[in-house]
Each structure stands twice: as C-alpha cells, then as structure tokens.
Image: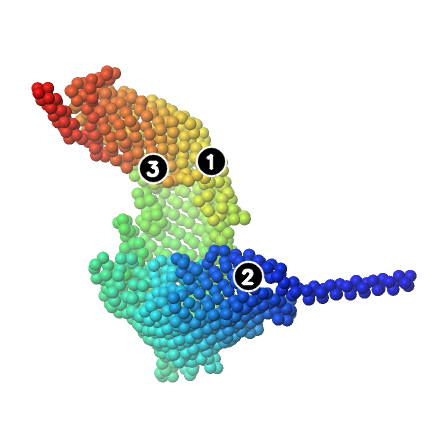
Amino acid sequence: MKLKKIFRKKTFRLIFTVLIILILMAIFLVPVLVSSSGGRNLIMARIGAAAKGKASCDTLSMGWLKGIRLEYFRFNDNAGQITASAKQFSAKPHYLSLLVGAVSVDLAVNDGNVKIIGPKTQTVELSQINSQVSLRPPGSKTAFDINMVVADKTESKVVAEGNISPGAGWSLRGASGIIDVDVNDLDLASLKPIFTLAGIDVQANGRISAVLKGELENGRIKNLDAGVKGKNLDVTAPQLKGDRFKTDVLDVKINMKDSNGLMNIDRFNIHADWADVNAAGVIPTTLVSLLDFTKAGSPYNLKGAFDCNLAAVLSQMPYTLGLKETVKMTAGRLSGDIDTYAAEGRKGIRTHSSLIGLEGIVDGKKVALSEPLTADAQISSDSNGLKFDKLDLTSSFAKINCFGDTRLLNCSADADLAKFQAELGQFLNTGPYKLAGLAAAKAKLAFTENKISAVGSSAVKDLRLTSADGSTAYEPAADLNYDAALDRKENLLGVNSFRLTASFGQITANSASLPLVSDAAKPLSLPLSAHLDLQKIQPFAVLLASFPKEMQLAGVLDSNMSLSAEKNNYRIVTDNTKITNLKISYPQQQPFEQAEVLLTANITFNPVDKTYTGKLQLTSPQIKIKGNINQTVSGGSAKLDGAANCEYDWAALSTIAAPYLPKGLTLTGQRKDNISFTSRYPINQPDKLLDNLTTDAKLGFQSAEYMGLNLGPTDVDIKVSSGLLKIAPFSTTLNNGRLNFAGEADFKATPKLFKTPAPLRILENIQIDDKTSKKLLMYLNPIFADAVNVTGIANFSCDKLIIPITGSNTDAEMIGTVSIDQMRLQGSGLLGQILSFTGAGSQGQNITIHPTQLVLEKGFLQYDNMQMDIGSNPVNFAGTIGLDKSLKMTITLPYTLQGKAVRTGQESAGQRISLAIKGSVDKPQLDVGKLIEQQAVEKGMELLEGLMRKK
C-alpha cells in the first residue's frame, strides 16, 4: 500500500514536470515559429486578408523582450489604390498590460512610404515616414513623434510631436499633455485621394502652413501659441450645395496663456479677404456667469472688434445663409466691437454692431436696405445683480428695446410685417407668403439661479397672408397671452397658461410641461382646448395645410385633447371633440350638412421605433366610422394591420371626398362596409407597403354618374393578396345598356398597372349623349368635338386593357373594337364640312360607325380604317389621336377624283378623294387646300394627256 502511494506521488510529479516543460517549450518555441518562413507567410496572409490586399516582408522576427520587427515591409491593396512600404516596422507590446485588458505598445516606422491613387489617377505620396508612437492606456502618457513628407507636384513636410494623457475612451475630454505641430506649405488639393479613401467628400484647394504649440490640462487649453497662413483657399462639400469657404489670404495668430485660472489673451487675430477679427484681454478659463464677469473688482477684461464684408460672405455662402437664388450681392458691411468698462463703482460690458450699406441686384434691378440695422447692449452689475442698461435692436422695419435687471427685465417689440418683407425679403427667403400687418409684443422676464420666468402678450393687427396664386387669409386682430418658465436644471419649459384669441376662435393650454431634452425631469404633457369657427379658419387651412381651395366650411369646432409622452412614446387622446352645424360645400355637389359630428381618438406612436397604434370613431347622422390601425416592428420588418366598420351615405360622402375623386363623379346609396387590411414590409422602404398588402372588401353604390355614363346598382368584390389586386367580374346597367368588367394589378411591379385578365365585352348597347360625346367620344373621332344633340347605341369589346396606377398616361395600352349604331348628331363643324361634300343636309342623317379595331399605345389612339356611313355615303377615317389632343388623321370622302359618287356596299370606280384633318381634338379642320392642290394636279395631268394624244 505504501509502495503504491510512493509510486502515485512520483507519477504525479513526473506528469506535472512534463507539463511545465511542455508549456515552457511552447512559450519559447512561439517566437521561433513566428520568425520562421512558414510563420512569416501565415502572418502576411492574415494581414493581407484583413486589409483586403497583399502583404509581404523580407524578414520577420519576434522575441518576447524585443517584440515584433519587420524588415522591408510591402503592401498593395486589391483595388490598386494603396501602395505602402517601410524599411523597418516594429511593435513592442507590454504583455503585463495586455493581460489586464489595457493597450500598451511601442510602435516605430523607419523610412516608410505610402502612395494613394485617387480619382482621375491623382496620386499623393506620404514619404520619408519616420515615426515613433508609445500608446498607453487612458490615464497614462502616450508619446508620439511623427515626421513625413506629403508630395504631389510639390513637397510639404509635416511634423507632429508631443505627449498626452487621454481621457476616458481615448477622448480629449479630460486629457492633459503637450502638442507641437508644424505643417510646411501643404497643398490641400494633394489630400483628395486621402479624403476619397476615408469616405470624406470634400473638395479643397489652396496651400496652408501652420505652427501650433499647445498644452492641455484636464481637457482645457492651458497655453496656445498658434500661427496659420493660407493662400488661395477654396473648400466646399456636397452638404453645402454649392456654397464654399474661399479666401486668397488667411492669417491667424493666437497667443494665450493660463495663469492662476485666468486666460491671458495677448493676441487673437484672424485676417481673411473678407473679414478681420481682433481680441485681447483676460477671461476666465472656465465658463462663469455674466454676473461674476461684471462684478466690481473682478480681474476680467476684454476688448475686441470685427469687420466683415458681408456681400463677399453672402456671395460665397448664399444657400447656408438663406440668400435668394436671384440675388447678387454688391455691397454691405457687418462690423462691431466689445469692451469692458468701469465707472461709478460698477463694471460692465458694452457692445455695438451694425449692418450698413447692404446692396444687391435682383433681375437687373438694384435693391438695398433703406436704413442701417444696429444692435447695442450695455450690461453691468451692482449689489442686486446684473443690470441691463440697454438691449436695443433698431431697423427700418422693427424695434426691440429691453431694460431692467435679473429680477425683472422689461422687453417690448414692434414690427411692420410688410416693411420687414420689403426690406429683408429683397435678399433673404422670408417664406412662401406675402406678409402684411403690424405686430407688437411685451414681456417681463425674471431670472433666478436655475429658472427664467416670462409673462407677456403679443398682438397682430390686420394680418394678411397672400400666396403666389393669389389666395389670401386675413385676420383683423389676434392676441396671445402666456405665462411660462424655463427650468434650466430640470431642462423643462413649464407653461402655466397659454391663450390665443382671434376672430376665428380661441386656443388655450394650461399646466403644460415641455421637456427640452430626452432625460428631462418631467415627460411631455400638453393639454389643449379649442373653440374654432371653421368658416373663418378655412382660408388659413387652404394656405397652411393644403386644404382644397374650392371647398367651403362652416360650423363650430369644440375640442379638448391632450398630447403626452413617456420616453419615445407619444400619445394623442381626445374624447370630447364636437362639430356643430357642420356644412361642407363643393362646386357641382350637394352641400353636406350635419347638426352634430362627434370624434374620439386614442393614438400612440413611437417615431424612433416607427411603431404606432390607434383607435378612432366618428359619429354623425350620415357617416359613422369606427376603426383601428397598428404597426409593429421586428428585425427590420414592419407589420401594419387595421380594420374599419363604416356606415355612410354616398351622397354625403361624395361632397367630402370630391377633391380627391375624379371631377364630375357623383355617387348615391346607403352603405355598410367592413374593411380590414394587413401588410408586412421593410421598415426603411415604406413604398413597399402596397407590394405586400392583403385586404378583402366589398364596395358599391346605388347609382353613379361620370362623364355622361350613368351606372345602376353596383357591388364590387375587391381582394388583395400579398400585393396582387383582383376585382371579381361584375355586371351592371349603364345608360340603358350593360357594363361588364373585371381586373387585376400586381403592386410589386414597376410601374403598377391595372389590367383586364382576359378579352371582355365591356360595353353592350349603351346609349350615348352630349356628355359622353364631349368627355369621351371626341378622343375617338374628331366629328364629336363640338357636336350637340348626340344620340346612338355603342358597343365596345376589349382584347387588352392596361391602365397605369403609377407612372404616366403614356403607359396605358388598349386593343379593342368599337361600333356605334343609330347615331345622330348636330352642330359639328367638321361633320358639316363633310356633309357639304356628300351633298346631304345636316339634319335627319342616320350615322353608323362600323366595327373598328383600335390600338392605344404610348399616349396615342390609332386605327387604320374607321368607316362611318352617313346615310348611304361611306366616309373613312384613319390615323392617330393623341391624349395630348394632337391630331394626325386623314378622311376619305365618298367621291372619286373623277367626280363619281360612291355608295355603301358599291365598288368605287377610281381613286376616292382623301383629305388631311388639321388642328386639335377640340378644334379639328379639314385641310381643303390639299384638295385644291390635288385637283389642280389631276386637271394638269388630264390636259397633258390630251396634248399628247393630239401629237
């Protein structure tokens, strides 16, 4: 037993010893394996795969103490854009730091070279790269010493050295250290390949030199001595939409130093072609209140001035600054100054700025501000706090004056809206409407440590908004009263009361909370009450909310609703919205009148997740709708579903929906319909909603009238399954005949087209009249252009019918056959001309259009031979009629060139007379000049033949 224990102990020791030896061998063999040719090839292959290219080196060596060293390293990317090489590259990790998850490594590049090929084979080369970087974890100093030459057509040397202790997450916030940068005559255009490779779309030209020596302490600038010189600078980017930063000369000189918490600015000078900024003084290194800055005995002082050629700036950056496209600036200067002063035991700050001589040219006409625009401020302090001795803004169109202290600041403002637009509107976009009216405002502001309270009122008299098409909205007098407080600590705007009173009614809000940031102390809570006269607010709805201009409203709206939010979930609720004595009028429609309409709604939506759910119920004597809609999002896919129960009277609904229905369509009938739908589509592609829609509905009406077509009772089954729409075959009465129809559409297709599934006899023995003639038949044949007292019986069979849902009318296609019997009409100018050739009168003639095959394609209706018998006289039409009302047709008369008449069913003895039809669909004319020319040629030929016989 004892021997067994001894044997077991020796065995364990042997195994443990072998394991230790194996581990040590593995540790010592790793550098050998890595430094071998096989290890080198494997590592180069991994580097190439990671960088999407091919990497190689002559030698690779590794040691646990000396790190990794590559000799004569080379790299080429697969795209042919980057070529890199280095005589020597080394990396020396600090393994103990890596074991605890901290990056600590020394990197060195000797005699490196990187060539980058950009667009249009533009090449930039970073050569003579000799750099050392000692990366250390946050809290420790990272040292760097970078030297290289940037070469395109010329060479520029770039040197950067220093050491820095980065803040958390390797950011400059909280960082400390020293930075020294020297850039010598760098050509910005040469950096374009680098910008392209980095995905930065910036176009930069010019040359720049810079010397910067700075020191950071806990994320703040402690010392800075900087000089920047630029020549012929021109920088732009697509985001600027044509705007650019451009100056032939840029000279920046900054020298400031921190001393015991005070930043001494010896020099802060910026000079460009169009601006000069100069400042000097002593300011705090950390942001302090204005009160501390202006306290008597404070060590702070500041003196500065700026002068800007505003015309030059506006010319360079018209889009960014909102300048009109048609304006060319010619003059204008914006200048100002700021300084501190001490007088009568008080210290203060005063500033003055002015905009003078602003001029430009619009469409060859000179425009200018009639008076300078000036701003003045004078702020001081005493034992009670800050004193605002003056805060004034003066112009020809507005005046703002403020005075007081932090306990109470009194502000007043007056503006002439027409003058405001006439003055600034010459240069800047002041909105889509022409403005008129007088505005006045008064407010009292109170300041505490964390809160700004405001109580005030505003009034507008004779406000008039006029759109480009001449639509006008007028308000004789509107008043706004408010009591609000901004809590800077809680990032919250609290509204104690808000009341807007105008001729169209009143809107109020009380005890509202409006958060300014997402993590404010309270969520959004906005209760609203409204009492509105719809007739008076309708003109504003037309201008501001795209309400149909032809539709007229009347009635009184009373509503209580609330808007609330919790994080990103917003909720709109109303259970007490009522319209009394509602009347909606629309041209050629019966007015829709309801004594009372009730609306309830509960809608929740999340704009971040793009989810929402809602319930809505509308109740009135003639229309009742109750429905819900929901959208959820999962894995980048949205699911939308909803349902509605509807009871409505088409006669009433037609008036409301008239602006969105085909003009002239009227419907009648009481309906009860249930509609449900669902769709799943990519959340970032809302246009795919129809592609995946599934719904099942029944729609119908008691009667309908459109373009002279009178339909009887109709019920239509509509089904959509995964984006495939199908309308089941149905039949109904139409103008004492029959309409037969069916169709389908694939919403996944582009463009989306509605098609008949098979050949179909769409119209059977329908009666035509003046309306169908003017609206439809004039596109079939030009004789219907100005015809009156039209009667007849029409038939139409269709082999193919395609109607575009999206796209243009030119996507429509049709192949079919049309015929009309027992037709009579009067008053057609073109028909009168035709009858004069046939010798028949314009009264009492039966007209028959023989079955004619029609082809509609690319916006043109074409047929080769439409025979129209006027009595017993055959008249034949051929050519094309455009949906754009163009005509290219010929008509063949029932007479030959030899003067012989042709009757229907008879063989013609000789060539019949053919004429062109000129003009348009609504104004066609026979080209008789062609007939005279043709007859002259015939007579000439006959005379020539006679002379030849005599010879």
Residue 388 at least partly seen: no
Asked whether the beta carbons under mark 2 and mark 1 sit within 8 Å of each other, the answer is: no
Secondary structure of the residue carrying numbered label 3: helix
Quadrant hosting residue 864 = top left
Q: How many marks?
A: 3
Question: Which residue is the extreme one toward the top?
Answer: 906
Q: Please tell me which residue lies in front, 674 or 904.
A: 904
Residue named by callout 3: 810
User: Is 524 displayed left or right of 550 in the figure?
Assistant: right
- Amino acid type shown at disc 3: Thr
Q: What percent of the width, then of the height, locates residue 580? A: 38, 44
Residue shown at 38% from the left, 51% from the top = 531
Q: Nearer the viewer, mark 3 or mark 1?
A: 3
Please report the residue visible at 33 percent of the width from the left and 71 percent of the height from the top. Answer: 249
Quadrant where the C terminus sits is top left
Location of the N terminus (image quadrant) = bottom right
Q: Using the numbered discs, state the Cα–Cα distance from disc 3 to disc 1 in whole angstroms.
A: 23 Å
Could you tell me which secondary element the residue under label 2 belongs to? strand
Vertical comparison of 142 with 555: above or below: below
- Residue 689 versus residue 601: which sits nearer the camera? 689
Tell me which numbered mark, 2 or 1, is placed earlier along the sequence: 2
Residue denoted by label 2: 56
